[in-house]
Amino acid sequence: MMSKAHRLHPAAIMFYLYKELRSIILPAFFMLIALLNSSVMIMILVITLLILVVITKCLLRYFTFSYQLLDHEILVKSGIFVKKVNHVPYDRIQNITSNQWFFLKPFGLEELEIETAGHSEGPEVSLAAVSVKLKDELNKYRSEVDTADKSKNVSRETFSGESYSITWRELLKFSLTSPAFLSGLLAILAIYGKVQNGISKKFYALAANEMQHLGVILIVVGLFLVMLIFYIVSVLILIAKYYHFNLVKVNNKLQMQYGLFKTKKTSIATSRVQAVVVKQALLRRFLKIATVKLVIISNSKKEDTEKDIIIMPVIETAQLEEFLNRFFPDIAVDKLKIKDPLPKTYYYDLRNALIFAVIGDVIFGILFYAIVWLVLSFVLLSLIFCMVPAYLRARRSNLSIIDKNYLYLTNNHLFTKNSYFIPKSSIQLVERRQSIWLEKNLFAHLRINCRSGVGERVIMVKYLSADWVDEVVRWYKS
Amino acid sequence: MDKIEKLPKDIKTIWRINVFIDFLLFLIVLSALVIIAVFLPEEGQHLVEIGQMIVGIVAIVVLAGELILIPYRWNFWTYYIDERQVELHKGFFFRKQIIIPIARVQNVTLKQGPILRIKDLQKVIVVTAAGKSEIEGIKASQAETLKELLMKLAQEAKNDV
């Protein structure tokens, strides 16, 4: 069985165009600003030239790209000047993700991203527009290779499709409480900083003159409106992104499907799962909702927490136990006994935070002693941002051994509560820390290393009863 | 090797040499500052002089501190290996206890720089899938047997699974 080399669907050209335009839009914008003073002729010339270059590049890219399904591997040829031939054996494929924009649905097209365990940035192979049938075909090839390999292996467990979808109510709660708009605002501020350099002085003076007419109140209202718009937009984006989030478990794989305009399908082999994390920000805790993520082995080089794969963006805490039971039957959630935090833990965490805050306040006070209100507000802010997380940390630092295979551990990051369910088999090493003073008071810290992405993840709980920590050490050794 | 072991006494010499190398680095920075001062105008020189003072003081404090801490470091740095796990213990005032199950050991690296070679010591690095831990220096012959033992145990542990 061997197919000949295929080209992508011509719709891929549009896709390339979109990507190309997105990457040059900002530089092009600055270039136009720079050309603002020159004649219209030159501007039109430059713009047409730019468009021509982009179009030819996309066309060339399209016509030089081909893929071929062979018996044991997928062969991808690409490159305009530098020819690249990429062989990806089926049994090395870790993950196939498909993205489908709503307007491609009628044509039966989607984007496929093929990931391997290689250390490349992003997916190894990206097929911009191919028929939806290709994924099934690929999976067929993969399973053929798989069964040929594993026929001698013991029969694997199969679970008939457990499925879970989020409800509208959950999705709304989730989007409304997301702080994502803040990061959007920051991004805009950063772009503004760049634009400020680009905009000519003339333009700037004009704007400043305009601003003088507006009062301070108007500016504040304007800022508020901008924030509000950002908030609404980010809520809408989130709703579109996680619309109809559906999680299915089949054959030791977790499959997710979500998105309104762009339907994304991805699957994770349960063997890659290192730990299950339940995250809860303060606001969401009041609304009794949480996010479930997985720490997995992948080739992602992103930041620690971004690497974690969201398998359930939002779930009501009441449903959590049932959810875990269905998708992770290994974790005996019902056996989980959570101990009360010790009063001494509060003392240690609050003391440390207080010392930290006071030192900061004193330094700030020395620098700005002349401006009393500034110092006072700094003191207030430092107390809020040190003491509240410290209180939460003390309250949320906890651990409990569920059974001989699973450890339950909670800690706090700023205002977010993280609960980890870690199987013993994925803990790479355990570190117990204790200072001589803590020993007297029978307290200790615990650090646990797991694999995450291509690197390590350190999960730490501080100021726990030494008995609890020792119990974990003994549990780990046995 | 079923007992808690300390690093060989020779490691203290190595640490001392390392401390002096650190001190040398400080001296290089200091002499660079002295040379810079020559090329600067009056006002600048004052600033550089303060810099020189700070670097000098830090260098001496670091030198003295590290030299004093060497016996402490040596005394409270122990390791323990049995057929189930590798354990490392560090420190007295701030105690660390690291436990690596043999089954999690991915590979063992032996490393020997020129300074360790003087005393015929070797650094043993135990690598797991997430990060690594070091035994800073043990006798080369011992390191060899340790490596053999670790790899044999790791093999057996893997076969068990």
Image (cartoon, rainbow, N blue to C red):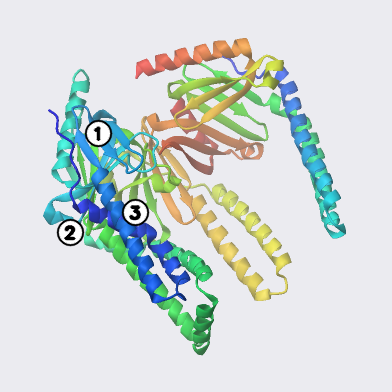
Residue A67 at what x, y percent from top left?
A: 22, 38
Count of marks overlaid on the render: 3
> Closer to the N terminus: mark 2 or mark 3?
2
Residue B134 at what x, y percent from top left?
A: 58, 26
What residue is at 33 percent from the left and 59 percent from the top? A21
A93 or A406: nearer the viewer? A93
| Quarter of the view holding residue B13 | top right
Circle 2 crowding by C-alpha within 10 Å: few under 14, some 14–19, many from 20: few
- Chain for numbered disc 3: A
A376 or A374: nearer the viewer? A374
Q: Disc 2 on helix, strand or loop?
A: helix
> Closer to the N terminus: mark 2 or mark 1?
1
Residue A398 at what x, y percent from top left?
A: 46, 44
Q: Amino acid at mark 2?
A: Phe
Same chain under badges 2 and 1? The reply is: yes
| Quarter of the view holding residue B146 | top right
